[in-house]
Amino acid sequence: MPRERELEGSARDVDAVEDLTDKLRSGQFSDAIAACQSATEAKTNGQLCLQADGSVKRADPHSAFAQMVVPEPEEDPEEELRRLREARKAQLRNEETWKKQGHGSLRELKDEKEFLQIIAPHERALVLLDDGCSAAGEECRKTLGRMASRHLEAQFCWLHTDRAVFLMHMVKLEGLPAIFVLSHGEVTRHLPPSVLFRFSSASSPLFPGHLAKLLHAVGTIDNPDDDGASSDGDRSPRRGGSES
């Protein structure tokens, strides 16, 4: 009986080959191609594929694994620790460089000449222009002074209007206090009182947080937060992402 089945199978294979040959000779290539595709699909669909749950089923290997979620390889703890150490060293190098450049406090400028000399080498800086006569200006100086100690990535300065004669004539000011945002010594933004106090007055407890978000939006500081309003002098400085 097994021998007869084997002979029958061989006969069917011979008939299939002869039928395919006849189609190729007669120019019926579309039928031949369809037949080949059907044979290929039948073969692939019958392959055993391992599933995510450990089970095995017959399926097309080209699509059986399409919906499977491949877990990301876990990071080596030692490699992660090494990466964190390198990042910390880079932060310390940046902080040391910034401190040598005068970052970390609100620096009062003597005149416009010092303004040009101090601001030029810094990637990010701001200058508060104020006449020293308003409560709003005083609150701005206090808030910026606290923020400067936490955001070492930027140089914070302020200049009295009496020492900024040329600047006062060159720039049309809406009012005081005003902040000038600079990048590599060039003014990129002017923040007048209407922008500084758009959401809260200078005396509001919300003002420091709003100012921090505004300075982050214009690219002066990296991390906007309300910690800039804290008067706690021993808070650790906020790290930046790039060296100026």
Image (cartoon, rainbow, N blue to C red):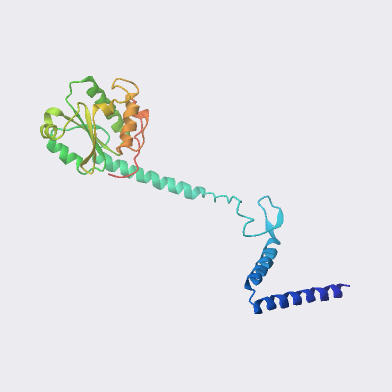
Query: Could you tell me which quadrant the C terminus lies in?
Result: top left
Residue at image position (67%, 64%) is 41
Q: Position of residue 73 (x, y in %)?
A: 54, 51
Point out the residue furthest to the right here.
1
Q: In the picture shown, does residue 227 fall above or below 81?
A: above
Residue 146 quadrant:
top left
Q: Is residue 232 visible from the viewing direction of this image?
A: no
Residue at image position (65%, 51%) is 52
Query: Could you tell me which quadrant the N terminus lies in?
Result: bottom right
Q: Position of residue 215 (x, y in %)?
A: 30, 34
Residue 149 quadrant:
top left
In the visual, does 124 lie left or right of 68? left
In the visual, does 47 lie left or right of 238? right
Q: Is residue 83 visible from the viewing direction of this image?
A: yes
Residue at image position (35%, 23%) is 206
Q: In the picture shown, does residue 121 fall above or below 208?
A: below
Q: Position of residue 238 (x, y in %)?
A: 35, 36
Q: Nearer the viewer, residue 69 or 237?
A: 69
Number of callouts in the render? Answer: 0
Q: Position of residue 46 (x, y in %)?
A: 71, 62
Q: Nearer the viewer, residue 236 or 51?
A: 51
Residue at image position (65%, 79%) is 25
Residue 101 quadrant:
top left
